[in-house]
Image: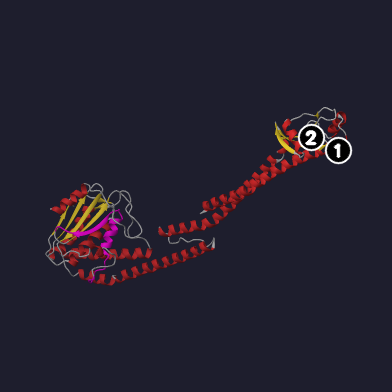
Amino acid sequence: MRWALVKVSLAVTTMVVVAFAVPLGLVIRELARDRAFSNAEREAAAVAPALSITTDRDQLERVVASAGSDAGMAVHLPAGDGQEALELGRRRAAEADIAAVRKLGRASTTGVTGGSTLLQPVALSTGKIAVVEVYVPESEVTNGVGTAWAVLAAVGVALILGSVAVADRLGVRMVRPAQRLVEGAHDLGEGRLGARVPEEGPTELRLAAVAFNSMADQVVQLLANERELAADLSHRLRTPLTVLRLNTASLGEGPAADQTRTAVEQLEREVDTIIRTAREAKPQTAAAGPGAGCDAAEVVRERMAFWSALAEDEGRKWRVAGADRPVRIPVARADLAAALDALLGNVFRHTAEGTAFAVDVHNGDDAVIVLVSDAGPGIPDPEAAMARGRGSGSDGSTGLGLDIVRRLAESTGGDVRIGSSVLGGTEVRIWIQLDGRAPATGGHRQPRRRRPGRLAAVYQRSRSR
């Protein structure tokens, strides 16, 4: 906007200066020419009275000399009454031009080498017509014109520079509040909730700044209310957790009892983490930096060992494939464990007892695929199931489990797909990108198209078994 104003001001001022300066310069040139020829007419008029009285050469020479223009004046007397034609001074005009003026009886100008001449006819006492020639050099015609043009050019440049300076100041006054508004929106978008915009500048931008600051205050208030609500709701879980922890003490010894106590302790830690995170207004997990992450195979083995006890109690067959070798991924260990627990919990929650399930890990050069499949009835509407907060409508279903999995995959630039598994039920495919590409922002990102590579071939072979 600033440079646009400067360009508009520069163009308009330049057109105005040209529109006024060029005609004014032409007028000045014409005035200088008229002044030069008016002086020549006065000099010719000074000789006319003497010519009307006498035609004596000596007397005329004295008259021409007294006029002070003998170097640039010539007098042409016609022949008559036994007197030869007489010429005084240096003749510059052509004989034909002189004859034409004598015949027509009116003054005329003609161009000669180095300037122009004024030919003025004068009636003699004998009735003949004499011609007075006054030389007007080119320097006299253009005297002062160059200076006038220089002054006009200087004034025009000064006007243009002044208008550009004024437009630039006006542009700064308009652009600076807009830039501050952009910077404030950028800071607020990056999580700096204290970002505010000075309420100054033009009326429209000042109102925009007021609206932005009001919006920022409301965002801060809403986030504070959300954090307090999350902390309060999480704190309410302490009472039933305490009862569970006390009840686990009466379970005795055994693998099932140990796993139950471990699960209760882990649940207590997660609740404490949620409360602390909500109170401190900090994200629960941070993005994994270079060299960070976890071993996906180890996490898969650990979580399957946890869920295997419940699977045996319900008579479910389960299988793990591809977790026998380390598989590094740029995802925090707790995040991957939460995603696997969400998917495996859905299997136990939404399929009948005895339904088999499997977890497969496929490691590629640019991505890692984690498949969680079951032999249940499947999901009739996968797109609706991926919508955050929709759930299945049954008790205990909030619709946030798959959203946790989706956010984990998209944090690496990958995605999540729901389809049919080789077991006959649902298959959830988690694509975890390894090349460090940043995920898209601003809502649900559309999955990127990838070229089929070695990992895609492995994945297709695993489905065809």
Instruction: Kindly indicate the quadrant of the structure image that contains residue 359.
Output: bottom left
Query: Looking at the image, which residue sits at the far front?
Result: 81
Which comes before the other along the chain, label 2 or label 1?
1
Mark 2–mark 1 Cα distance, whole angstroms, equals 13 Å
Residue that numbered label 1 is attached to: 49
- Residue 286 in the image: state x and y as whole percent: 33, 56
Residue 138 in view here: no
Q: Secondary structure at mark 1?
A: helix
Asked whether 160 falls inside the magenta stretch, the response is no
Q: Nearer the viewer, residue 170 or 324?
A: 170
Asked whether 412 falls inside the magenta stretch, the response is yes
154 in relation to 217, above or below: above
Instruction: Kindly indicate the quadrant of the structure image that contains residue 193.
Output: bottom left
Residue 145 in view here: yes
Q: Secondary structure at mark 2?
A: strand
- Residue 52 in the image: state x and y as whole percent: 86, 37
- Residue 236 in the image: state x and y as whole percent: 30, 72
Q: Which residues are magenta?
A: 393-422
Q: Nearer the viewer, residue 248 or 338?
A: 338
* Model colouring: secondary structure
Q: Determine whether, in the image, residue 399 is placed left or right of residue 359.
A: right
Residue that numbered label 2 is attached to: 131
- Residue 383 in the image: state x and y as whole percent: 25, 63
Look at label 1 and name its amino acid. Pro
Give the crowd class for mark 2: few <14, some 14-19, many >=20 residues within 10 Å.
Answer: many
Q: Are marks 2 and 1 in contact (CB under 8 Å)?
A: no
414 in relation to 136, above or below: below
